Amino acid sequence: MKKFVIAALGGTIAGTLLSVQVAPLLAEETSKPASVYQELDLFGDVFKRIRSDYVEQVDDKKLIEAAINGMLSSLDPHSSYMPADEYDDMKVQTRGSFGGLGIEVTMENGAVKVVSPMDGTPAAAAGIQSGDFITHVNGESLMGLTLDDAVDKMRGPVGSEVTLKIVREGKTEPFDVALTRDTIKLTAVKGRLEANTAVLRITTFNDQTFPNLQESLKKVADEAGGIDKLNGVVIDLRNNPGGLLTQAIAVSDAFLDKGEIVSTRGRKSEDSERFNATPGDLVNGKPIVVLINGGSASASEIVTGALQDHHRAIVVGTKSFGKGSVQTVIPVQNEGAMRLTTSRYYTPSGRSIQALGIAPDIVVPQPPEAPDADKATEDTPETRSEADLRGVLSNDSMTEDEKKQAEEERSKAEEAAKLRLEDFQLAYAIDIIKGLAVAGQTLVPVDDPRTAAKPAKP
């Protein structure tokens, strides 16, 4: 049976994944302490009494599944059971296409919290934000429900509508958001060229992530006139909730020539693994900036930690989510699967980011959007220069080609200024790449991150 090793946030994607159910597991050992059998007898006795004496008739299957749900959820927030249909959904999701709203959620203090909306999904289009709390679905309160049950409320047929009540920091009152469920088709990596800098936006780590990365980088490099024409790369991992561990390793390896990428340590020493980079760097040592925020979790943190520890990238943004555990999806009977936390992962320097997150080398919060930014721009009086004056003398020190080049550079600078209004963190990252390019500096990986000096924090 195929196992999936995943490094993703232990919530779920609303409308697609989670309903904690589990099939009974048979004991593998022939003898167990008497106390274990006594506890199992206690379970059987309670189950029998509920069946016979509860005020209403109960569904045996649901009752057992609810009991096992409690057992698994007591371990940690990321261990769960997937019945056959949920397991099928998960396998589809790792291939890059699934149905739902496109919201990654988790449970915090008994409330459903949005980790991140996914790019190009109904949730993103409706303005759902990382950190939002979902309190009601179609007017029905989620208070007291498990994460599984809450997600079930958000599921439904493609094309159907759902209304979520949102509580958001900075808003005095909860407000409703209407969404239409859709088939979510994810392009794991989207690339674009910004001022000779390749911007690679990675939204998830599924089977298509590394192939998409190669394709996107090639396309951007071709647009720039070749990989040598690029002055660096920005890897945007903001609001990326994670995914397949194998893909996180592949993405890290794409920019590292050697050294450890990540290690995992399980309960037994023989379960520990170490993953190392292979020769070859897709961008030939050009500077890299990694963008993260509070929605960057697990697999995103593996990539960030590997590139940061090797001094291969400068990390910019805000502290990441802090999920340092790895889940193995184990198929079980009844065609379902169990998602079980089997190990912790450690960055190349040997640090665990569990519940701590990764601190950026340069902390850059994203300023709140100014509501009247467009109006302010429109009201700004147009300035005049020497060139606007009647009868102005011509500039005889530049050829027409040089004047054209200067105009192009000015235009690029104006575009960069516009980007600062749209996405300050990304503009900051691109400015860092520009600065390194002007200084003629590259970021060189260190041989052993465990003994290397840590980069100074500004």
Image (cartoon, grey):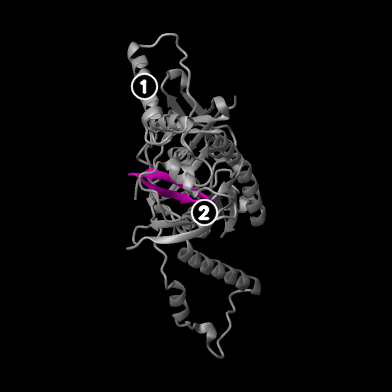
Quarter of the figure with residue 96: top right
User: Is 314 or 242 nearer to us in this picture?
Assistant: 242
Amino acid at dot 2: Ala
Residue at the spot of label 2: 437
> Crowding at label 2, few (<14), some or many (≥20) Cα neighbours within 10 Å?
some
Q: Is residue 196 visible?
A: no
Would you say residue 368 sits in the magenta stretch?
Answer: no
- Which badge, 1 or 2, comes first in the chain's sequence? 1
Of the 4 image quadrants, the one containing the N terminus is top right
Image position, residue 202 (x, y; %): 54, 48
Residue stretch rendered in magenta on the structure: 101-123
Residue at the image position 42 percent from the left and 33 percent from the top: 66
In the displayed structure, would residue 237 be above or below residue 253?
below
Residue at the spot of label 1: 45
Image position, residue 387 (x, y; %): 54, 83
In the displayed structure, would residue 72 be above or below residue 213?
above
- Along the horizontal axis of the image, is 17 left or right of 369? right
Would you say residue 106 sits in the magenta stretch?
Answer: yes
Secondary element under disc 1, as helix, strand or loop, is: helix
User: Is 384 or 90 nearer to us in this picture?
Assistant: 90
**C-alpha gap between disc 1 and disc 2:** 72 Å
Residue at the image position 43 percent from the left and 61 percent from the top: 176
Residue at the image position 64 percent from the left and 52 percent from the top: 221
- Along the horizontal axis of the image, is 313 left or right of 279? left
